[in-house]
Image: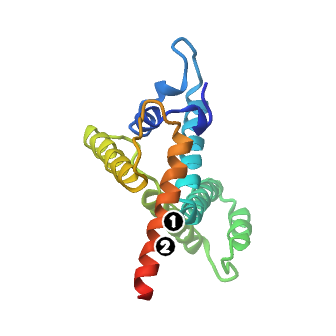
Amino acid sequence: MIESLGRLTVSQFVELICGDTGVLTPKHEVVAPAKLREAVRGIIFEYNAIAHGASMKSHVASAGRLAKARAGLFLFSVCRSFAKMDEYGRVKEILEACGADVSRMDERRVDAEITSRMERAKRCIAESQPAQDIADADSLRIRSGFDAQTAALMAHFRFQIDPDTMKASCYARLVARHDREVRAQIEAMKKK
């Protein structure tokens, strides 16, 4: 199974982004879906780290918020279970560890606090998580975006890019270099 960006061509990477995970596995290799998802995430992360290094901080922060929200949702689900078993002492310990002032909370207020925190976590997950289904329209938009980006790179660097032979990691480096050079040109124009 392919697990790194450097082993994919640009065309294969675009297919992967459009949802075709078959580009990662040889014809008769069977791979666990969880391992396949992890490889896809890793390859996309690798591309973004190379091509869009500066914006990766934002992506990492967003991923951190999503992980925190998922952990919170699990934790407060456990709290809800404890509350149903009348284990409010344990629930208060957990809420206190999460920063809540539980000294004056009765059971009704504890239940409301659990519900409130669960809803906040659910909202954060819904806002942070990209849609799981990639529609045909999205695939067309993605392909069109890569075509436009490739055209801009070819015009800027004045050479042809063959997406069927160029490695995706090399392409990502060209994107990063193009972005740096365009930003430098814009800054130079502002100084005039």
Circle 2 residue? 184
Q: Is 86 or 150 nearer to us in this picture?
A: 150
Q: Is 22 or 68 nearer to us in this picture?
A: 22
Q: Residue furthest front?
A: 158
- Which residue is located at x 36 percent, y 46 percent? 146
Q: Measured along the vertical axis of the image, is residue 142 above or below residue 94?
A: above
Asked if marks 2 and 1 touch (Cβ < 8 Å), the reply is: yes
Image coordinates of residue 96 in percent, x first then y, are 71, 73
Image quadrant holding the C terminus, namely bottom left
User: How many numbered marks are there?
Assistant: 2
Q: Is 190 or 136 nearer to us in this picture?
A: 190
Circle 1 residue? 180
- Which residue is located at x 73 percent, y 70 percent? 97
- Which residue is located at x 48 percent, y 54 percent? 175
* Amino acid type at image mark 1: Arg
* Amino acid type at image mark 2: Ala
Q: Measured along the vertical axis of the image, is residue 66 above or below residue 6?
A: below
